[in-house]
Amino acid sequence: MARGTARTRQSSEETRERLITAAGRVLREDGYTAASARTVAATAGVNSALVFYHFGGVDPLLLAALDRSSAERMAMHQPVAARAATLEELVEAAIEIYRTDLRHGYTAEFCELAAAAVTKPQLRTEISTRADPWIAFVEEHWERVVGGSPLGRLLPAREVAHGAITYYLGVNFFSVLDEDSSRTEAVFGLAERLAPRARLLTMRLPRRSAPAEDP
C-alpha cells in the first residue's frame, strides 16, 4: 500500500513538472494567447483535464512556469552581478544578464504575462509580486557598487531598479520594430561608453571630520 501511494505521488509530481515545463515552452515560443489548457497539455503529452486538477486553471500554471524560470534566473544571475565592482562592470553584467535571458526565452515569458495583465486585472498583482525580487536584485547591486557616491545620491537605487525593470519590459516589446536587435545593442553601446565617463561620480569621498571644539 505504502509503495503504491509513493508511486502515485511520484507520478503526480512528474505530471506537474511536465506541465510546468510545457507551459514555459508554449509561453516562450507561441505566446500567452496560444497557451490554452489543450495546447499546454498536448505539449506535455497529458490530458488537458490535468491542468485544472493540478493547478486549477491555465493562468496558475503559467505563473508556476514563471516562478520556476525566475528561480533559475536568480541562481544564474546573482554570481554575474556579484562580480561587478565598478560601474563599468555593473553595466557589463546587466548586458550579459539581458542577453542570457533573451537567448533562453526568459524575457518572453515574463513579458507575455505582463502584457496579458493589461487586459486581465487579476494577473496584475501576481506579476507585480513576481517583479519585486528583481527590483530588490537591482537595488542591492546598484547600492553595493555606487551607494554613498555622488552618482548614488543622484540616482537612488529604488528609482534605478524601477527604470531597469521598465526597460527590460519595454525592450522586449520594442523587438517587434528591432528585429535584428541593432537598436537595442546601440543603447547598450551607449551605456558602455557613458559608464567610464561617470567614474568620478562613483568615487566615495571621505567624510569631513567635525571641527574640534575650543577648550
Image (spheres, helix red, strand yellow):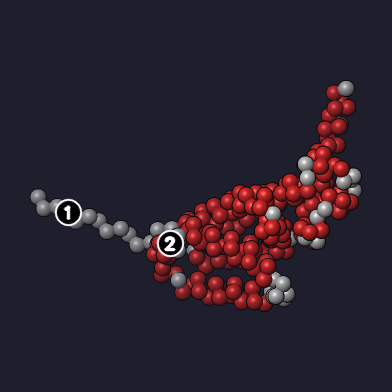
Name the residue located 63 percent from the left edge and 66 percent from the top edge.
170
Furthest residue in direction left, as rendered:
215
Can you see residue 157?
yes
1 vs 2, front mark: 2
In the image, residue 135 lies at what x, y percent? Answer: 56, 55
Residue drawn where x is 76% and y is 58% of the image: 32
Residue pictured at 86% horizontal, 31% vertical: 7
Residue to which mark 2 is pinned: 152
- For the residues labelled 1 and 2, the Cα–Cα distance comes to 30 Å
Residue at position x 62%, y 49% in the image:
125
How far from the left and from the top, in percent, is residue 88?
52, 67
- 26 lies left or right of 172: right
Q: Is residue 74 left or right of residue 17?
A: left
**Quadrant location, the N terminus:** top right
Displayed quadrant of residue 191: bottom right
Mark 1 or 2, nearer chain start = 2
What residue is shown with label 1?
Answer: 212
Secondary structure under the numbered disc 1 in the rendered image:
loop
What residue type is disc 2 on?
Gly
Q: Is residue 129 left or right of residue 66?
A: left
